[in-house]
Image (cartoon, grey):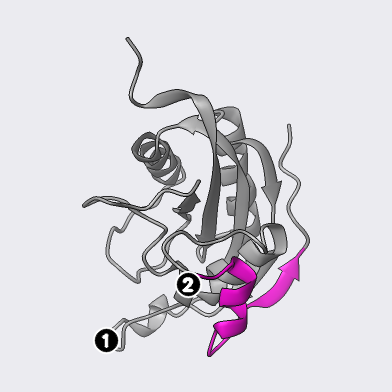
Amino acid sequence: MTDASTSTLSSFVLIGLGTNLGDRYTNLISALKFIEDHKLIETMIASPVYETPATLAPESPKEWDKPFLNMCVMGTTHLAPGKLLQQLKECEDKMGRLSPERWSPRVIDIDVLLYGDYQLETPSLTIPHIQFTKRDFALVPAADIAPDTSIPGTPHSIKEWVAKLTENKAVFYADPPRWHS
């Protein structure tokens, strides 16, 4: 009997990480260490870090307007998409992500952007990420590490989607963090 949460095959995965509370750079490193220590993603390749303005709803409180640090990581995983998401949410919880409220500031936010050539829509997970092709804070770092990767369900690669952005506020912040123990 096989466990539906894992596979003997590995799949390409691309995740996005963002943080706008506390020591943002250290938050990214802590999340990367969690991912590595828990073997969620193997052979991780990290993008540079970018700073972007917070994405807010018009009625959001002014104190939520804190810039994010964003990056992407790609690699392979043996975890099924739902199990990977569950483990990434555990990382968010352990790092102190408090508010589930949309647009609110967060110590860490981790999203599954791509998982192989999967197209999946469940109440808790949509792959490719539903807003991936519209978000400079996800596309720009992703293009640094996987520019020619096609986005399933679209006729374009990541770098082609970056070229289509109507607004790009992603500003280089730092080289890829070193997180290895």
Q: Is residue 168 above or below residue 68?
A: below
The label nearer to you, 2 versus 1, is: 2
Q: Is residue 18 above or below residue 131?
A: above
> What's the magenta region?
155-174
Question: Can residue 181 be seen by looking at this rendering?
Answer: yes
Q: Can you give x and y, in whole percent of width and height, for residue 71 in the image?
A: 61, 60
Look at the numbered discs 2 and 1 and tell me whether their residues touch, using CB distance below 8 Å: no
Q: Can you give x and y, in whole percent of width and height, for residue 127 in the image?
A: 38, 54
Q: Can you give x and y, in whole percent of width and height, for residue 37 in the image?
A: 59, 29
Few, some or many residues within 10 Å of mark 2 (<14, 14–19, 20+) = many
- In the displayed structure, does residue 175 sit left or right of residue 77? right
Identify the residue under disc 2.
Answer: 133
Of 158 and 132, nearer the camera is: 158
Residue at 35% in and 69% down: 104
Three-letter code for the amino acid on which mark 1 is drawn:
Glu
Identify the residue under disc 1.
Answer: 59
